[in-house]
Image (cartoon, helix red, strand yellow):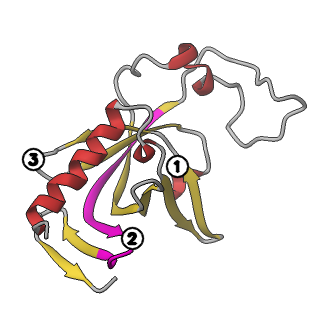
C-alpha cells in the first residue's frame, strides 16, 4: 500500500503535470465558490502551480470584471477529476486576486480580457467589441487542504492532507 507521504507527492505531481500537459484531465478543474445567492461552480484552466516545496498555490487566469472575482475573496474549493483513472482531488484554500505588473503572453493577444463590457453581460451577438484596456487578473488559491479519493473495484481509498504541514490521514471512503 502506498504511504501517505508518497500519495501527497503523487497528488502534487498530477497537479504539476496538469500545468504542462494540455491533455491532462486535471488541467480543467471545477472551481467552486459561494456567495449570498448560493454555490457557484465553473471550469477554469489551471495555469501554474507554485510553492511545491512549501504551501502549494494554484494559479488561474480570469477577467477582473467577472462576478466571480467578488466571490473569490472568500475561501474556494477546486475539484479535479480523472475519469479514466477514477481519481478525484479536492483542494481547499484561501483565494486572492493578483494584478501582475504585465500580463503573460495571452492567446489571441488577450482578446478575452479586452472586451468593452464585463463577461456575462447580455449581448446582441457572440462577437464582443474590443477595447484597449486589458482586464486580466490572476486568481491565486493558497491551499490549506488536499483530499484524495480513488474509486477502485477492490476498495475505494481516501485520504486528507494539511497542505501547510503535509501531514495526512486515511479517511473512510
- With respect to residue 36, does 46 lie above or below? above
Secondary structure of the residue carrying numbered label 3: loop
Say which label, 1 or 2, has the lower sequence index. 1
Name the residue: 52% across, 18% down. Answer: 107
Q: Residues within 10 Å of mark 3 (few under 14, many from 20)?
A: few
Residue 100 located within the stretch drawn in magenta:
no
Q: Is residue 126 above or below residue 78?
A: above
Nearer the observer: mark 1 or 2; the answer is: 2
Q: Position of residue 158 (x, y in %)?
A: 29, 75
- Residue 20 - label: none
Find residue 132 and report its image quarter.
Answer: top right
- The residue under the point 59% across, 40% down is 65
Horizontal relation, residue 95 to residue 145: left or right? right
92 on left or right of 32: left
Name the N-terminal-most of marks 1 and 3: 3
Residue 171 vertical position relative to residue 165 in the rendered view, above or below: below
| C-alpha distance separating marks 1 and 3 | 28 Å
Magenta portion: prevailing SS class: strand
Label 1, label 2: how far apart the Cα atoms are: 33 Å
* Mark 2, residue position: 151
Q: Which residues are magenta?
A: 137-157
Image disc number at residue 69: 1
Q: Position of residue 40 (x, y in %)?
A: 59, 62
The residue singled out by tag 3 in the image is 53
* Residue 148 locus on image (x, y percent): 30, 67
Amino acid at each position: 500500500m502506498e504511504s501517505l507521504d508518497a500519495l501527497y507527492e503523487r497528488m502534487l505531481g498530477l497537479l504539476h503535470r496538469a500545468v504542462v500537459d494540455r491533455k491532462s484531465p486535471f488541467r480543467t478543474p471545477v472551481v467552486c465558490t459561494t456567495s449570498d445567492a448560493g454555490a457557484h461552480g465553473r471550469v477554469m484552466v489551471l495555469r501554474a502551480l507554485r510553492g511545491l516545496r512549501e504551501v502549494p498555490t494554484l494559479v488561474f487566469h480570469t477577467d477582473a470584471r467577472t462576478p466571480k472575482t467578488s466571490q473569490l475573496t472568500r475561501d474556494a474549493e477546486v475539484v479535479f477529476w480523472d475519469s479514466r483513472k477514477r481519481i478525484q482531488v479536492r483542494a481547499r484554500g484561501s483565494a486572492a486576486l493578483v494584478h501582475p505588473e504585465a500580463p503573460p503572453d495571452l492567446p489571441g493577444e488577450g482578446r478575452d480580457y479586452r472586451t468593452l463590457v464585463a463577461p456575462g453581460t447580455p449581448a446582441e451577438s457572440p462577437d464582443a467589441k474590443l477595447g484597449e484596456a486589458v482586464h486580466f487578473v490572476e486568481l491565486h488559491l493558497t491551499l490549506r487542504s488536499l483530499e484524495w479519493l480513488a474509486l477502485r473495484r477492490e476498495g475505494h481509498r481516501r485520504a486528507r492532507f494539511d497542505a501547510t504541514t503535509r501531514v495526512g490521514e486515511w479517511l473512510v471512503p
